Image (spheres, coloured by chain):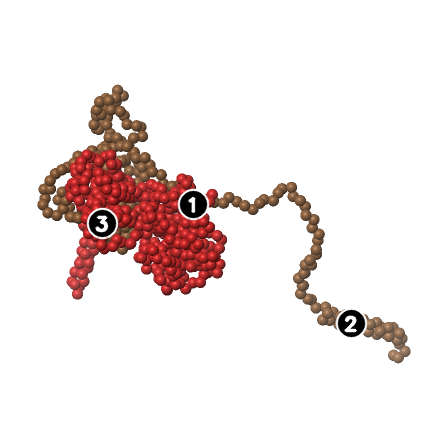
Chain colours: A red, B brown
C-alpha cells in the first residue's frame, strides 16, 4: 500500500513538472502564420491598371468608363492613369504584356470589355491579372445581356473583380431610394448607385416618406393622402402601390428590413409617442421592441441588431442599439445606419452641431471609438452605406448641395448627384437573370 | 389643712384652661391645614411659547442679489481626420566634413555620398535602406522551374495554390497586423535602441467564434519589464474587442487562435 502511494506521488510530481516544463506552443500552421507586431502603422496600397481600349464601340466605352470610375471610387487602389500605359496592342483579343505593365508599377491588371454578339446581345467580360502570379488571368467573368443592361452589367463585373482581388465582392450593382421634396409634398425617388436612372415612384398628390428596400427589391414607404394617417405601402417596379396589412390604425413613420429581409421594423405612432415594432415583412407577428418613450428611424445592422433614435421627455435624442444608448450624451443624434466594413461593423449617424447643421460621425457597433467624418463642409445628413460597406453616401449642403459619396478607406468625398432629400437607403440590385451567364 | 390658702384662684385656673384649649385648637388647625391634599407638590409643566405677531419692515440692501447660473459644459465632437502628407525617406549617407574628429570612432559606417549630392532636409526621415520604388522593380520574366499546381511567382514552401485566396489572405493578414499594431505603444527612449533591437515577445491570442479576443497567453517573454508591460497593455486593450472580420469569400481563414510576435527589430528608434 505504501509503495503504491509513493509511486503515485512520484508520478503526480513528474507529470506536474512536465506540465511546467511544457515547451512553447507549436508553430502556427494556419494560413495566417505568425503575425509580426511592431507598433508601426504600415499600409500598402495596391497599384492597379485598367487596360485602355481603342475600341470605338459605345458598349465598350461605357463598360470601361464604369469600371475605371468604380475602381477609383473604392479608394482601395492606386489606379494608374491611362498616360502610363505602355505602348502596345489593346484589341479585344490581344494578349496583355505583363512585363511591360510590371515596369510601370502595376501589381494588378484589370481588363474589361464589351462587344456585340451575332445574337444582338452584348457580351461583357472582365479579367484580372496578378503580376506576381504570371501572365495568365487569375479570374474571368463573362455576362451576356441586352443593350440597356450594359451599364449595370459593367457594375456587376466590377463587383465580381473586386471579390476576386480582395475577397470581398463590390457593391456597385446597387440602387438608392430616398424621399425628396416635390412642390408642397414629398415623393419617393429611386436611382442607381452611379446616379443614373433617377425616377419618382410615387404619385405627386401623395405625401410619401421614409422609404426602404424590402424583399424582392420592392420599395416600402409610408404615405398620407390629404392629411390622413401615414400608411405602409410596398411597390414593385412597374406595378401599382399596394397597402401592407399591419395591425395599426395610427400613423407609421418609418420602416426597415434586416439583411436577409426576413424581419421588418416599423415606427408606429401611439397616443402622443412613437414605438418600434418588429415582425414579418407581411406585417404579421408585430411586437413592440423599443424601450424609450419616443422611438423612430429603425434600422438593422448586418449582425441583426436593431437600432433606433430614442427620445426622452426632456427632448434629448440618442441612438439606441438593442435598447442601449450608444451615441454620446449631449448631442442630438439622427438617421443611424450601419456599414459592414473591412474592419468590422461600424455605426454612422448624424449629430447636430449648431447653426442648423449636422455632421456625420462613425463609431463601432456599440458606440465606442467615435470619429468624425465631416467638418466645416455644410450640413451633412442621412448617411447610407453601400452593400459592401466600402462607401458611404449622404446628403450635403456643401457646394450647392447634393448626394455625395465617401470612401470609407481613403475618406475622399465626391459629388454623385445634385439631388437632395431625406431617409436615404442603399441596397444591392437583385441578381442578374440566369440567362445572363453565357 | 383646709384653711391653707389656694395658690391659684379659680379665675387663674379658668384662664389657664382656656388658653391651653386655644393653643391646642390652633395646633390642631395648623396640623389639619398642613396635611391637606391641596398642598401636594405637582410636576412642572412645559411652558408653551405663544406666537406673537410682529411687524417686519424690509430694508433694501445695497448689494444686488446673485443670479442663479453657471458655466455649461458643452460636449465636443472630435476633429475630423486629416490626411498627412507622406514623409519622404532618405538613405543615411556620410559626407566629408572639415569639422569631423580625427579619431577611428568618428569614422561613419554609412556609405559615402557621391559627388555633390544635396543634404536631406532637416526634418527628413533618415533610414538605413529606403523602401524600394515599385515602379523601378525590374520585371522578373523567369520561367517556372517547378511543374504542377501553383504560380510562377510562388515559393517552394508555399501551400496555397489558389492565387485569389492567397491574395485575399495576404491582405487580411496585413489588416490583422495593423489592428494589433495600433495597440502596441512603447514610450520613446524607454528602452535603449541597441537593447530594443534585440527584444521580442510571443503571444497567443484566443478568439471567440465572432472574432472577439477572448484572452491571451504570453509565450516567450522578452525579459525586459518595460517591453513586456507594453505587450501586456496592447493585449489587454485588445481583449473583448473584435478583430477585423475575414474576407466574406473566405470566412474560414480566421483560426481560433492567433500567434503574435511583438518586436521592434528593424524599426526606426529615437
Q: Nearer the viewer, mark 3 or mark 2?
A: 3
* Crowding near the residue tagged with mark 3, few <14, some 14–19, many ≥20 C-alpha atoms within 10 Å: some
The answer to whether A407 appears left or right of A106 in the picture is right
Please tell me whether residue B93 is drawn above or below residue B49 in the rendered image: above
Please tell me whether residue A370 is drawn above or below residue A304 in the rendered image: above
Q: Which residue is mark 3?
A: A121
The residue under the point 12% across, 48% down is B149
Discs 2 and 1 share one subunit: no
Q: Which mark is residue B213?
A: none
> How far across and down, in percent of the image, does residue A50 sit?
23, 40
Q: Secondary structure at mark 3?
A: loop
The residue under the point 16% across, 40% down is A94
Quadrant where the N terminus of chain A sits is bottom left
Q: Secondary structure at mark 1?
A: strand
Question: Who is closer to the viewer here, A346 or B126?
Answer: A346
Q: Secondary structure at mark 2?
A: helix
The residue under the point 77% across, 70% down is B30
Q: Which mark is residue A358?
A: 1
Q: Nearer the viewer, mark 1 or mark 3?
A: 3
Discs 3 and 2 share one subunit: no
Numbered disc 1: what chain? A
Q: Which residue is mark 2?
A: B29
> How far across and down, in percent of the image, does residue A34 sit?
21, 46
- Whether residue A167 appears in this view of the structure is no
* Crowding near the residue tagged with mark 2, few <14, some 14–19, many ≥20 C-alpha atoms within 10 Å: few
Q: Quadrant of residue B46?
A: bottom right
Whole-number angstrom distance, CA of label 2 to CA of label 1: 106 Å
Amino acid at each position: 500500500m505504501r509503495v503504491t502511494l509513493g509511486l503515485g506521488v512520484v508520478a503526480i510530481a513528474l507529470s506536474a513538472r512536465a506540465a511546467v516544463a511544457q515547451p512553447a506552443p507549436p508553430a502556427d500552421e494556419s494560413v495566417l502564420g505568425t503575425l509580426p507586431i511592431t507598433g508601426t502603422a504600415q499600409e500598402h496600397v495596391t497599384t492597379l491598371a485598367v487596360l485602355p481600349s481603342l475600341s470605338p464601340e459605345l458598349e465598350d466605352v461605357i463598360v470601361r468608363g464604369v469600371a475605371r470610375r468604380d475602381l477609383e471610387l473604392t479608394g482601395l487602389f492606386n489606379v494608374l492613369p491611362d498616360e502610363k500605359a505602355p505602348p502596345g496592342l489593346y484589341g479585344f483579343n490581344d494578349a496583355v504584356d505583363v512585363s511591360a505593365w510590371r515596369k510601370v508599377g502595376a501589381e494588378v491588371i484589370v481588363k474589361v470589355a464589351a462587344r456585340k454578339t451575332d445574337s444582338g446581345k452584348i457580351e461583357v467580360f472582365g479579367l484580372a491579372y496578378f503580376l506576381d502570379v504570371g501572365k495568365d488571368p487569375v479570374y474571368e467573368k463573362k455576362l451576356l445581356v441586352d443593350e440597356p443592361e450594359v451599364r449595370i452589367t459593367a457594375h456587376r463585373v466590377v463587383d465580381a473583380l473586386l471579390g476576386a482581388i480582395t475577397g470581398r465582392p463590390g457593391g456597385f450593382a446597387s440602387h438608392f431610394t430616398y424621399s425628396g421634396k416635390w412642390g408642397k409634398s414629398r415623393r419617393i425617388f429611386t436611382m442607381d448607385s452611379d446616379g443614373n436612372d433617377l425616377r419618382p415612384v410615387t404619385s405627386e398628390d401623395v405625401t410619401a416618406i421614409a422609404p426602404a428596400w424590402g424583399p424582392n427589391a420592392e420599395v416600402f414607404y409610408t404615405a398620407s393622402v390629404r392629411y390622413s394617417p401615414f400608411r405602409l405601402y410596398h411597390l414593385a417596379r412597374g406595378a401599382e402601390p399596394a397597402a401592407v396589412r399591419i395591425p395599426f390604425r395610427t400613423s407609421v413613420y418609418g420602416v426597415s428590413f434586416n439583411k436577409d429581409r426576413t424581419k421588418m421594423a416599423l415606427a408606429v405612432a401611439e397616443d402622443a409617442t412613437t414605438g418600434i415594432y418588429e415582425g414579418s415583412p407581411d406585417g404579421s407577428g408585430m411586437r413592440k421592441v423599443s424601450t424609450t418613450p419616443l422611438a423612430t428611424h429603425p434600422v438593422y445592422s448586418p449582425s441583426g441588431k436593431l437600432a433606433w433614435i430614442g427620445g426622452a421627455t426632456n427632448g434629448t435624442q440618442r441612438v439606441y442599439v438593442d435598447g442601449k444608448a450608444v451615441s454620446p450624451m449631449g448631442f442630438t443624434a439622427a438617421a443611424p445606419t450601419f456599414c459592414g466594413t473591412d474592419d468590422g461593423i461600424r455605426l454612422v449617424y448624424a449629430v447636430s452641431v449648431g447653426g442648423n447643421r449636422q455632421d456625420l460621425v462613425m463609431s463601432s457597433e456599440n458606440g465606442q471609438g467615435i470619429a468624425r467624418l465631416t467638418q466645416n463642409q455644410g450640413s451633412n445628413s442621412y448617411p447610407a452605406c453601400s452593400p459592401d460597406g466600402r462607401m458611404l453616401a449622404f446628403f450635403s449642403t456643401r457646394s450647392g448641395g447634393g448626394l455625395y459619396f465617401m470612401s470609407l478607406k481613403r475618406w475622399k468625398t465626391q459629388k454623385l448627384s445634385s439631388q437632395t432629400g431625406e431617409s436615404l437607403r442603399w441596397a444591392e440590385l437583385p441578381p442578374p437573370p440566369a440567362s445572363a451567364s453565357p | 389643712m383646709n384653711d391653707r390658702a389656694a395658690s391659684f384662684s379659680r379665675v387663674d385656673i379658668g384662664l389657664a384652661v382656656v388658653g391651653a384649649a386655644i393653643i391646642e385648637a390652633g395646633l390642631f388647625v395648623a396640623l389639619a391645614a398642613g396635611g391637606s391634599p391641596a398642598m401636594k407638590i405637582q410636576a412642572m409643566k412645559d411652558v408653551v411659547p405663544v406666537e406673537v405677531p410682529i411687524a417686519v419692515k424690509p430694508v433694501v440692501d445695497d448689494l444686488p442679489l446673485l443670479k442663479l447660473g453657471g458655466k455649461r459644459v458643452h460636449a465636443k465632437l472630435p476633429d475630423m481626420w486629416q490626411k498627412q502628407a507622406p514623409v519622404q525617406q532618405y538613405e543615411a549617407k556620410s559626407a566629408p566634413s572639415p569639422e569631423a574628429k580625427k579619431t577611428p570612432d568618428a569614422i561613419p559606417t554609412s556609405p559615402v555620398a557621391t559627388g555633390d549630392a544635396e543634404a536631406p532636409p532637416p526634418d527628413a526621415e533618415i533610414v538605413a535602406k529606403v523602401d524600394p520604388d515599385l515602379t523601378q522593380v525590374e520585371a522578373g520574366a523567369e520561367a517556372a522551374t517547378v511543374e504542377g499546381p501553383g504560380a510562377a511567382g510562388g515559393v517552394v514552401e508555399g501551400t496555397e495554390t489558389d492565387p485569389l485566396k492567397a491574395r485575399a489572405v495576404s491582405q487580411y493578414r496585413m489588416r490583422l497586423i495593423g489592428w494589433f499594431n495600433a495597440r502596441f505603444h512603447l514610450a520613446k527612449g524607454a528602452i535603449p535602441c541597441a537593447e530594443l533591437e534585440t527584444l521580442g515577445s510571443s503571444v497567443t491570442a484566443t478568439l471567440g467564434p465572432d472574432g472577439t479576443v477572448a484572452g491571451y497567453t504570453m509565450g516567450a517573454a522578452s525579459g525586459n519589464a518595460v517591453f513586456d508591460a507594453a505587450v501586456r497593455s496592447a493585449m489587454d486593450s485588445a481583449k473583448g474587442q473584435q478583430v477585423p472580420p475575414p474576407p466574406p469569400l473566405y470566412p474560414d481563414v480566421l483560426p481560433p487562435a492567433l500567434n503574435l510576435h511583438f518586436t521592434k527589430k528593424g524599426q526606426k528608434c529615437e
